[in-house]
Amino acid sequence: MKIKPNIAVSDSGFVFNPDTGESFTVNPIGVEIINLLKENKETSEISNQVRVKYTVDQPTFEKDFDDFIGLMRNYSLIEND
Amino acid sequence: MEKLRYERPLIKRLESEMPNKFGMKAEHFPKSHIDGVAVKDLIEAHGSPLFVLSEKTIRNTYQRAKKAFSTRYPKVQFAWSYKTNYMDAVCNIYHQEGSWAEVVSGFEYDKAIKNGVPGKRIIFNGPDKTIADLTKAIQNESLIHIDHLDELYTIVELTETIKKRPRVAIRVNMDTGVYPMWDRFGFNYENGQAWDALNKIMASGKMDLIGLHTHIGTFMLSAKAYGVAARKLADLALGLKRKYNHEVKYIDLGGGFPSKNTLKGAYLPGNDTNPVFDDFAEEIASALLNAEFSPDALPLLILETGRALVDDAGFLLGTVISNKRSSKGKRSTIIDIGVNLLFTSFWYDHKITPAQDFTHFNEETTVFGPLCMNIDVIRESAVLPLLNKGDHFVIHTVGAYNMTQWMQFITLRPRIVLIGLDEKVHIIREAETMDSFNKFENMPDYLKKFEL
């Protein structure tokens, strides 16, 4: 999956979608994930990186990741496959 | 390298809406300790869920209530409402503080006796007092608050065989300007039922009428209603003096004061809006002092406050089972505490605070219990920090009614611990076990075997 290229993300967690004019707030781990998505990292790679840094097991993170991506898709921040 | 605490990724759309002057303060700090004891340690040692009571809060709240009334009225007596929380350890804290016992059943009466309360210091309320209960109460010289005429006639009958004069009061119901008016207990003031009962007691000559009692409602948000109630009971007492030259010894205003909980549908947190002891004390004391009692014959003021005394001292600790998202996209969190343990969640929006550090990010969440029942909802909507599976949390203000109205349903009820003034943890009720549950069951022989 790919994040739309024109989505602006600040380090403080402010996300802006110029297509819709909508803005969002994202927590620090969400910002890390968005930045990894922008680098076209695969899901497994993102999962590994997060699990190295944070106290979370794989099933929990993958469930939360799917939920996060689902919301981003819902907000039209992810490109359609 | 030590790993960082995980918080699930969150994205929230920023929406500009009308500013909300009733904005609820989000949780800013975790509730990691109760009276100096770590929530994590409590759960490790005693399991999750776990009821925790704070002796310090119980005593402080009692002393605050006592001060509010005794600084305004010279003769005040509290009677601990057993039905609010009849854990023996809790009752005895109140008895140590000087509270009498207020009971509403034979079971509660026996509990008070077992706790060592002298019969004379037990107030016996309620509509269901059996002949055995009444006999015991008469013999022990307890204060019997008569609820209906059938009970009155039963007591008159009992005086034929028991050689003691029953010490009685009547319960009076009345219009105090609040809705709904509680008129199912006792005798009505406005339509003359109360006077009818008083006349019958006085005419019988077989019992000592020593008090007047009312209990006007529950979680009362109007202190003024108590002023009305006190004036009406004072009017009855003064009427007895005029008609029979009989002085009642006490006026019992019952209970009904609210705790700091927030009722469902309330705009503002109960902590900010509910009247406090001083408000009620001011109304009641003024009404009694301004009535026409002779200064040397002021009746004793009895209060049967339960909820307002113990609710804040109770905490329910639990653990997150799972986070889900509903079909409509709303976040839901499943916890290991259901409505079977937290009966009061049917009418309160209980405050829930994580027990570990969290960030300022939060999400509107429905909090579900673990029961396989659709009604098992602890909070329909709560703005909560991001809780992970396995995280612990504290539900506040659960000391009243939950430990007496809890239900054994699909699981066993947990331990209750008391944190003493010395910050030591005392188990005051063990967790139920399969054996303790099965003790009450019997299997007929012919049902013992089957083949599948």
Image: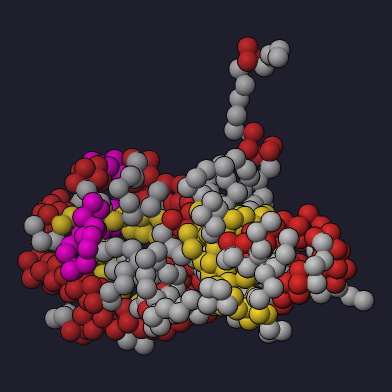
Q: Quadrant of the C terminus of chain B?
A: top right
Q: Position of residue B129 (x, y in %)?
A: 34, 45
Q: Is residue B137 above or below residue A8?
A: above
User: What residue do we see at 76% from left, 60% from top?
Assistant: A61
Q: Residue B144 appears at what percent x and percent y?
A: 31, 55
Residue at the far right in the pictured view: B1
**Which residue: 32% across, 82% down?**
B279
Quadrant occupied by the N terminus of chain B: bottom right
Asked if A62 appears above or below B219 in the picture, the reply is above
Give the vertical position of B18 relative to B435 (above or below): below
Residue A63, how many percent across, how many down? 72, 56
> Percent position (x, y) of residue B369?
57, 52
One can see residue A16 in this view: yes
Number of numbered markers? 0
Q: Quadrant of residue B54?
A: bottom right
The segment highlighted magenta reads: B157-186
Q: Nearer the viewer, residue B10 or A3?
A: A3
Where is residue A27, by image quadrant? bottom right
* Most foreground residue, B126 or B76: B126
Answer with the quarter of the image where residue B40 lies. bottom right
**Does residue B89 appear in this view?**
no
Closer-to-camera residue (B183/B199): B183
The answer to whether A60 appears left or right of B18 in the picture is: right
The outermost residue toward the bottom is B71
As for residue B404 lying within the magenta part, the answer is: no
Residue that appears at 62% across and 43% down? B411
Q: How is the image coloured?
A: secondary structure
Q: Residue at x 14, y 67 (%)?
A: B236
B175 or B40, nearer to the observer: B40
Q: Is B222 displayed left or right of B38 in the figure?
A: left
In this rendering, position of residue B213 left or right of residue B201: right
Q: Main secondary structure of the magenta part?
A: loop
